Image (cartoon, rainbow, N blue to C red):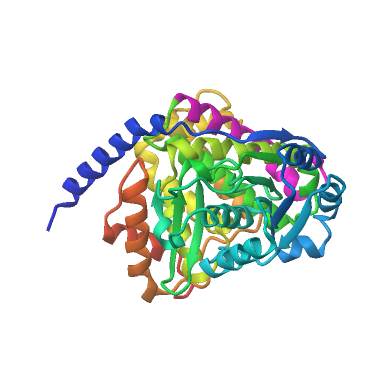
Amino acid sequence: MIPFSLKVFFFKVWQFLLKLTTPLLRFRTPELFTGPGSSLVLCEHIAKTGVTNLLIVTDAMLVKIGLLNPIQEKLRALGIGITVYDGVLPNPTIAQIETGLTMLKSKGCTAILAIGGGSSIDAAKVIAARAKNPHKIVHMAGLMRVFFKPLPLYAVPTTAGTGSEVTIAAVVSDPSTTRKFAIMDPCLVPLAAALDGALMTGLPAPITAATGMDALTHAVEAYISHNQTEKTDIEALDATKLIMENLTEAVKNGSNVEARQNMALASFKAGVAFTTAGVGYVHAIAHNLGAYYHVPHGLANAIVLPRVLDLSKSHCTDRLARLAEVSGLKKGGESNAQLADAFIAKVRAMNADYGIPTQVDKLKEADIPAITDKALSEAHMFYAVPRYMDRPECQAFIRQMLPAGT
């Protein structure tokens, strides 16, 4: 059996090689439209590209509450035919994506507009890829496996959390294997996106909180990653500052358009940061909590985040201290260790204030070995975490989240 210390050495070598090659990928960002009403400006942009038949990928609730109505009216006024696919659910599955693909082909759509949270945008990314690639979705899993350029894709996020409108990744669930996997390719970044805070004012407080903590997780994991760069540091720190200044207001006063707009920008910046720097154990574990128990991704991240920061603290104290500074926690005279503790305490306090639980009610002891194996496989292959866990330690870590009394 290979000693764990030797495995860690190979993990670090692999991550070092990834860091060297990442700049060669030249991640682009979408053309960005921002501010209340920017979603309608995006419609005008789409029309100027010559699109005449558009598939909108969204979820049924957004259709039901009429959030899409102004956008649809604008597109029709611009002479663009619309087909709406609203079958996307949280943690989108292969079957949902294939259903959307069938609709796209049957209606002859030549471009896609994703409107919704990360699930809708991720599903739209994969539909766009499948429309031009013959291989199955499972064969796209991993890095750079989308061989042909996807259909033109545009995005309007309606939550401030995933940053999917700017990332190279799309996460897909396969219920048949209890697996959640990421497809990662620069060609999946939408061509243009609108950050329209006015569309987010009706979000319920629990969703606002969970998605906001998702964005914070992206910023924090990117900042403490060993794959960080000067650019990702700037974006991650900006995102953290914006979240700390605006999330509580957005949760408690959802009609505050300025807070919503700032959170949308924070989510975008965090997405830019983690697209290059990557994430870490929070995501690796949260992905599997979603795959096994359908825990919403932002909520799972929020539950796992403070525990991972406790675990990693001794290996990234100075960086956690810097996060504390931009969060307004430095009063003067504190050591970096004290500031790191203050930042972790702040994250826990935010979770408590927003009603986010500390345990995962559906977590089962019998599932922990499999969740551990899948989480470690994901993290050790793709994420440059500050501190590595072996299998027994990871099992014990996940076991802390068992429901009380288990």
The residue lying toward the viewer, choosing from 163 and 295, is 163
Expressed as whole percent of the image width and height from the top left, the position of residue 50 reads: 72, 41
Asked if the magenta segment contains residue 250, the reply would be yes
Compared to residue 183, the image places residue 234 above or below, namely above
Q: How many marks?
A: 0
Q: Residue at x 49, y 30 (%)?
A: 232
Residue 137: percent from left, percent from top: 46, 61
Q: Where does residue 8 sit, x and y in percent of width and height?
A: 23, 45
Judge whether residue 353 can be spotted in this image.
no
Towards the viewer: 233 or 333? 233
* Image position of 55 (left or right of 202): left
Residue 178 visible in this rendered orientation of the protein: yes
Examine the structure image and report whether residue 13 is included in the region drawn in magenta. no
Quadrant in the picture for the N terminus = bottom left
- Image spot of residue 118 (x, y percent): 61, 53
Residue 387 is left or right of residue 45, and the answer is left
Segment colored magenta: 230-257
Q: Main secondary structure of the magenta part?
A: helix
Q: Residue at x 51, y 23 (%)?
A: 333
Quarter of the figure with the C terminus: bottom left
Q: Position of 331 compared to 277: left or right? A: right
Q: Is residue 346 above or below residue 206?
A: above
Question: Looking at the rendering, which quadrant does residue 154 occupy?
Answer: top right
